[in-house]
């Protein structure tokens, strides 16, 4: 079983000039409840189906499996998804030995910017750039599956 360990932060200042690259992302959900989410994501010219289990008590770690699928299949599956979608631009920003993925949300979530960092374990230390704001790890209102609503 694969495990995702990540922390999330709001972004409080400019960061775009630090990005190595960016991607335009649209994502929908095929299932979403307290025990699991099944997400379909199209990022530029790639598509992924991702299954995530329930988060641990702190909201930092959970089981995750991700599979690349053809974009044509993803486009065929989208009509089967739950109501709502996420549209965002993702920026990849290096920081020490890590890379922050910073999502600038569009449409009904316009103005929201969240930075995520994936860690090898819950206690791994990492550099916190000055543009990072409040930590929102484990706050369900910042889960993408809830932001789609």
Image: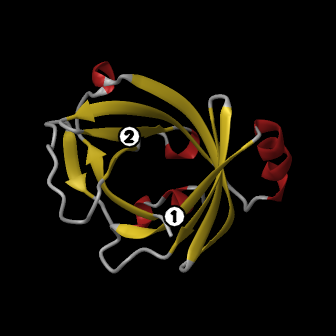
In this view, 48 is above or below 149: above
Residue nearest the viewer, comparing 88 with 22: 22
Q: Which residue is mark 2?
A: 101
Nearer the observer, disc 1 or disc 2? Answer: 1
The residue shown at (31%, 31%) is 93
In the picture as drawn, the residue positioned furthest to the front comes out as 1
* Count of marks, rendered view: 2
- Whether residues under marks 1 and 2 lie with C-beta atoms below 8 angstroms apart, the answer is no
Instruction: Identify the residue at image location x=72%, y=59%.
Output: 83
Q: Would you name the residue on which mark 1 appears? A: 64
Q: Relative to 50, is 140 above or below?
A: below
Image-based side of 134 in relation to 74, left or right = left
Left/right placement of residue 20 relative to residue 76 reads left
Q: Quadrant of residue 57?
A: bottom left
Residue 133 seen: yes
Identify the coloring. secondary structure
Real-space Cα distance between discs 1 and 2? 17 Å
Q: Position of residue 66 (x, y in %)?
A: 59, 55
SS under mark 1: strand
Task: Write the residue at 41% across / 31% down.
Answer: 91
Q: Quarter-wise, where is residue 58 in the image?
A: bottom left
x and y, in percent, of residue 40 in the image: 67, 52
């Amino acid at each position: 079983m694969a495990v995702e360990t990540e922390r999330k932060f709001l972004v409080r200042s400019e960061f775009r000039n630090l990005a190595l690259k960016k991607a335009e992302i649209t994502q929908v959900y095929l299932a979403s409840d307290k025990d699991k989410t099944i997400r379909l994501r199209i990022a530029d010219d790639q598509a992924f189906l991702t299954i995530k289990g329930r988060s641990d008590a702190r909201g930092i770690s959970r089981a995750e499996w991700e599979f690349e699928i053809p974009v044509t299949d993803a486009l065929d599956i989208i009509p089967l998804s739950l109501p709502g979608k996420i549209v965002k631009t993702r920026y990849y920003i290096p920081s020490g030995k890590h890379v922050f993925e910073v999502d600038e949300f569009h449409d009904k979530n316009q103005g929201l910017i969240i930075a995520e960092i994936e860690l090898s374990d819950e206690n791994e230390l990492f550099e916190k750039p000055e543009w990072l704001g409040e930590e929102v790890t484990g706050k369900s209102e910042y889960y993408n599956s809830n932001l789609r609503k």
